Image (cartoon, grey):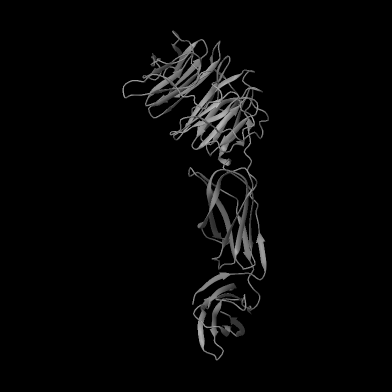
Amino acid sequence: MKYSFRLFALVLIALVTFSPKIIPQWNRMGISLNDNLIYSLMHDGTYIYAGTQTGIYRSNDEGKSWPSFYKTSDPVNALFKIGSNILAGVFESGIFLYTNDNNKWTNKYYLPCPYGFCFIESNSIIYVGQSGRVSFSTDFGNQWSLSNSTGFPGGVVQDLAISGAHLFAAIINSGVYLSSYNGSNWGNWNTVNAGLRTFDVRALEIIGSNLFAGTNEGGVLLLTDNASSWKDVSDGLTNKKILCLLANGTQLYAGTDGSGVFVTNDNGSSWTALNTGLSDGKISALVINNQTLYAANNLDKYVYKMDISALSVELTNFTAKINKTGNIQLNWTTATEIDNYGFDIERKLIKSGNWNKIGFVQGSGNSNSTKNYSFTDKDTSDAGYSYRLKQIDNSGKYKYTNEVAVVINSPSRFLLGQNFPNPFNPTTTIKYSIPASGYVSLKVYDIIGNEVAKLVDETKPAGNYQIDFDASMLNSGIYFYKMQSGNFMDTKKLILLK
């Protein structure tokens, strides 16, 4: 015969703390950048840099001030950090290098192509996308050389992406081109345009073996490692004019021309708008530093920031109560989920103790609809517990919810409850209460008085208890169970029907 013990309560007091709904919100950073259009952003861990139509500005006080870092007569299309140096691609003026050792900007690459629209680095080699060509530097931007241009079309190289030995170039009005490294040199350029809705490609990003293309009017498209053509992954995007893309782990952010920022964590199968506090935004650039996402909005010419540590789950409530069976039941609801692996359930005694994991509930990954979760704590024996959830992303990042607590009043008298169900087959539950610590005996007898089961035979603290009695080894019939504790004794009848 098998028995399992659980605490129950005759008088319940549930103290519930609601965890507030987590709504990621944009905050405008300080002042405008002298009413300049913003073309590029960069963060080096201390400063955030903004490339504008009149030069480079930077701030280390959350945008309260934007002192000029370098004045130019042309737009700064790209900014790139390499070691302690900074590269700036300035339209029609060349590629400028800032060296930290002498705090000086130098024009390193003007002729034959005075453009620098985007930078990327791989294996200590820096590549720059220009007009009708890709160049590279092996000495941190001091000297530049032309990459293999065979097969390369004319047009502005709006973005670059590297995956292993493959270099991809997004070329406005020409689509996507690919050059592969053969161990010593880059090969000829070839088109990768099958399935593209439009050849006006503005941005590229890579997550794992997946290549994403942000297009003008065509939304976001996906090219997987083993696919021969692009796949549209724009469902959920209310604006198909993509100005920039940014990958962060498994998350992909898309900046649009007029509808702000969207994020996906399932390779574009679903998108979530991130526009609270932003209104309509013409997002020209995105950058991340730690858990802060920055966006350049060219509608009002401000830089915005958002704490993305709260992005994974919008938790709308979290409650704890004692259910009808005497167990403590936790319930919580999420409004949306991004990259949600699941929830560790942690518990501690109200009066003392450390937090301990007592269970896990799988999350829904990515969801734009309400999801309800529950967990039942059946292993309770004290007068009160605090609970919290540890929400875990697929990347391993986590955060805790607020706590909820359940206090179970100690009983004021002895009580032996009637088993339920009754009749039963083959298990039933018996509840009992003791008002003070003491020895408890709970036994089962057959109709002629023979002991057939010993359910409790030990000292128990004051509390409310329940035990599951498994009578699978007994024959059908009438049985009696008797409880003794101190001067208290009570007997009740139970019926086993098989």
The quarter in which the C terminus is drawn is bottom right
Question: What residue is drawn where x is 63% and y is 27%?
Answer: 30
Question: What residue is drawn where x is 66% and y is 71%?
Answer: 10
Q: Position of residue 31 (x, y in %)?
A: 64, 24
In this rendered view, identify the residue nearer to me: 443 or 31. 443
Q: Position of residue 84 (x, y in %)?
A: 43, 24
Residue 460 visible in the picture: no
Count up the numbered dots. Answer: 0
224 vs 86: above or below: below
In this rendered view, identify the residue nearer to me: 263 or 197. 197
In this rendered view, identify the residue nearer to me: 262 or 220. 220
Position of 357 with respect to 329 (left or right) is left
Q: Position of residue 48 (x, y in %)?
A: 54, 26
Q: Residue furthest bottom?
A: 448
Position of 112 with respect to 344 (left or right) is left
410 vs 54: above or below: below
Q: Residue furthest left?
A: 184
252 vs 453: above or below: above
In this rendered view, identify the residue nearer to me: 336 or 151. 151
Residue 152 visible in the picture: yes
Question: What residue is drawn where x is 60% and y is 35%?
Answer: 235
Q: Position of residue 266 (x, y in %)?
A: 53, 39
